[in-house]
Image (tube, rainbow, N blue to C red):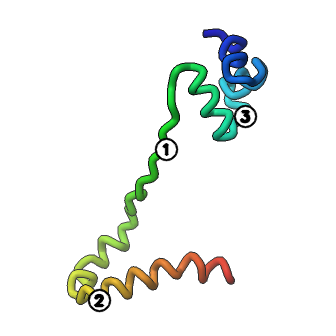
């Protein structure tokens, strides 16, 4: 399929398709969905937690294992508050 053919099927211009292909612009999600649909594809977005590879967390595992389940929950709640508190500073 040509850029022009894809653009026409997606309701956009050939220059938009060219800029996306060249990597000079990033399409909006709606534009990307239209382009993919015009090419016979469907966009599927999945969120997954990113693994934490902080070696300090691994070093802290023996201490965490000694905590009661309640204390572990409190520790997680405190960690989750950190980004919000940091934004206020």
Disc number lying in front (2 or 3)? 2
Position in image of residue 9 (x %, y %): 67, 18
Label 3 neighbourhood size at 10 Å, few (<14), some (14-19), many (20+)? few
- Which residue lies at the image location 52% right of the left edge and 21% below the top edge? 40
Q: In terms of secondary structure, where does tag 3 sit?
A: loop
Residue 48 lies, in percent from the top left, at: 41, 54
Q: Residue at x 52, y 81 (%)?
A: 81
User: In the rendering, at what x and y percent does residue 68 appear?
Assistant: 23, 89
Residue highlighted by disc 3: 25
* Sequence-first tag of 2 and 3: 3
Q: Considering the image in quadrants, where does the N terminus appear?
A: top right
Relative to 41, residue 53 above or below = below
Residue placed under numbered mark 1 in the picture: 45
The residue carrying pointer 2 sits among few (fewer than 14), some (14 to 19) or many (20 or more) residues within 10 Å by Cα, namely few
Label 2, label 3: how far apart the Cα atoms are: 48 Å
Q: Which residue is painted at 26% across and 76% down in the image?
A: 61
Lower position in the chain sequence, tag 2 or tag 1: 1
Left of 37 or right of it: where is 3? right
Q: How many callouts does the rendering have?
A: 3
Say which of marks 3 and 1 sits in front.
1
Secondary structure of the residue carrying tag 2 is helix
Does 9 sit left or right of 64 as displayed? right
Q: Is residue 47 above or below residue 73?
A: above
Compared to residue 55, the image places residue 75 above or below, namely: below
Give the residue at mark 2. 70
Task: Work out whether residue 83 or residue 62 is closer to the camera in this orientation and state it.
Answer: 83
**Residue 24 falls in which quadrant of the image?**
top right
CA gap between label 2 and label 1 equals: 34 Å
């Amino acid at each position: 399929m040509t850029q022009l053919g894809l653009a026409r099927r997606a309701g956009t211009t050939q220059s938009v398709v060219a800029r996306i292909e060249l990597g000079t612009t990033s399409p909006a999600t709606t534009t990307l969905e239209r382009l993919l649909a015009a090419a016979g594809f469907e966009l599927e977005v999945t969120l997954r937690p990113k693994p934490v590879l902080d070696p300090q967390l691994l070093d802290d595992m023996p201490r965490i294992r000694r905590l009661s389940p309640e204390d572990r929950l409190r520790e997680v709640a405190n960690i989750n508050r950190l980004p919000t508190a940091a934004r206020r500073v």
